[in-house]
Image (cartoon, grey):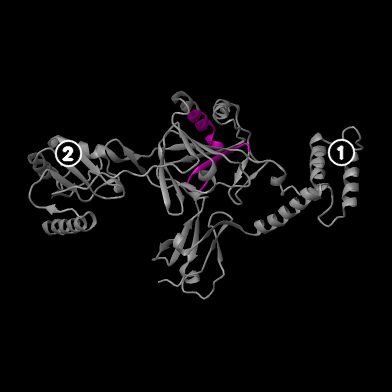
Amino acid sequence: MEQKLHRKRLKYTSILKKDMNIEASSSPTMNLMVCNYGLVNGLSRKDVLQVFSQYGQIERIIMLPHKSYCFICYTNVQDAINALDKVNWKVNSLPEQKLFYLIYTVSVPKLIEVSTSYPPGLEIIDNFITEKEENFMLQYFKKHWSESSAMKHRQVKHYGYEFDYDNNGVRYDSCDPIPKEFEFILNAIYLHLKWHPNQITVNKYLPGQGIPSHVDTHGVFDEYILSLSLNSDIIMEFRKGNYHNSILLKSKSLLIMSGESRFDWTHGITPRKFDMINTVDGPDIICRGTRISVTFRRVVQNHENIEVQRNLYEILGCDKTTPFEILKDSYRKLLVKLHPDKGILSSSTAACAELNKAWSVLKDSELKKTYDEQIEQCDIDTEVTIFETLNISDLENNEEEQTYSYRCRCGGMFLVPMSMVVNVDQIEPLLFPCDDCSLFVKIMLQNTNVS
């Protein structure tokens, strides 16, 4: 046992000297280093205080982002000696009964602050709703959550329009309307932005669950993406190129993405059970609870976003090759049949409106041209829908299984065998499917001659 502890002492002392350039000491000082626990493995300032404050007055605690060690600075040497004697590699008062390996250290690092600058176009309004309103919404979702759909790493419920994860679009007739119970939050949003959402996605995240980094669809939704956080704080990661910002979303806060943050930055939630935050004393961690996020979007409905799935030519009983005069004649004949005032057959007003909508596009040469191009693109997209175009460096390396992997927004995985993309002569990109939905990733093969 003593030999094992000695090996650990040598290991951690070596890491200390190499990583932090701090001189470890076998002589008592006022500074102690916890060598085997820090923010990265879930140790909080509250935990440190609970264990070490009983042995003397603590001047400061230094926690470092992404590090598995931390520092306790006492006001006098005797307090540090007492703490090391009582805590070093012994059972303590923490529920998890973490065993701390301690050493004296002559110096300690400077405080480091976690970067929390906002991407351009990002706004966060804390306490956008009251605690009473939050409880009301939580009770509503609790009552209606049985109607939600289960995804691989979270549960989802849609209102207004159903988000289609297979093609990054929306389904128009397969979703419940936005409940009247949400009017108070819709009114609050309108008062702030003069903007009305018509689509809501509700996600339920358990501790440890997240969502891969992504950019919400451009062509289907307009300039705003809003997210209301309920029941738990969480860190959302924003990335653009080499820039990476970790943003705290507090319970009851409203996140507003527009401009660059909406269109150019990816956003996602890392799957973990605690997050790193800034406090007045320095970096710390918060534990996640079950979080409900309510995302508000507005589906764009105009001639540039025509619903290609409802083929306008089929409504007129024709196709793309039909001459204009025959299209026109077919429209007139169908109008006589469908119009309530002229009808030979009884028909709904909706059917007549659908016919007029189709004709309003196909009679206009410019709109017809745009629509024909959309049909062609839709035919391409329905063959294969590309989620992202990636390089090998973007993938996670699984050496034991000889595969690369990448997380899909549905929660599934894109699996890429190494033999197909490493040290190959082919330079054309390859497509690989998600194991849980119909999306594909395109893998670029340039510069793949790596070991």
In reply to whether residue 158 is colored magenta, the answer given is: yes
Q: Residue furthest bottom?
A: 425
Q: Secondary structure at mark 2?
A: helix
Residue at 54% over, 36% down: 146
Q: Quadrant of residue 298?
A: top right
Q: Quadrant of residue 205?
A: top left
- Residue 208: x and y, percent? 40, 45
The residue lying toward the viewer, choosing from 416 and 63, is 63
Q: Which residues are magenta?
A: 137-160
Tag 2: amino acid: Phe
Residue at 27% over, 46% down: 64
The disc label shown at residue 445, or none = none
Name the residue beneath numbered marker 2: 52
Tag 1: amino acid: Leu
Question: Label 2 near label 1: C-beta < 8 Å?
Answer: no
Compared with 378, 45 (above or below) is above
Q: Quadrant of the N terminus?
A: bottom left
Q: Is residue 212 left or right of residue 332?
A: left
Compared with 235, 441 (above or below) is below
Neighbourhood count class around disc 2 (C-alpha, 10 Å): few under 14, some 14–19, many 20 upward: many
The disc label shown at residue 338, or none = 1
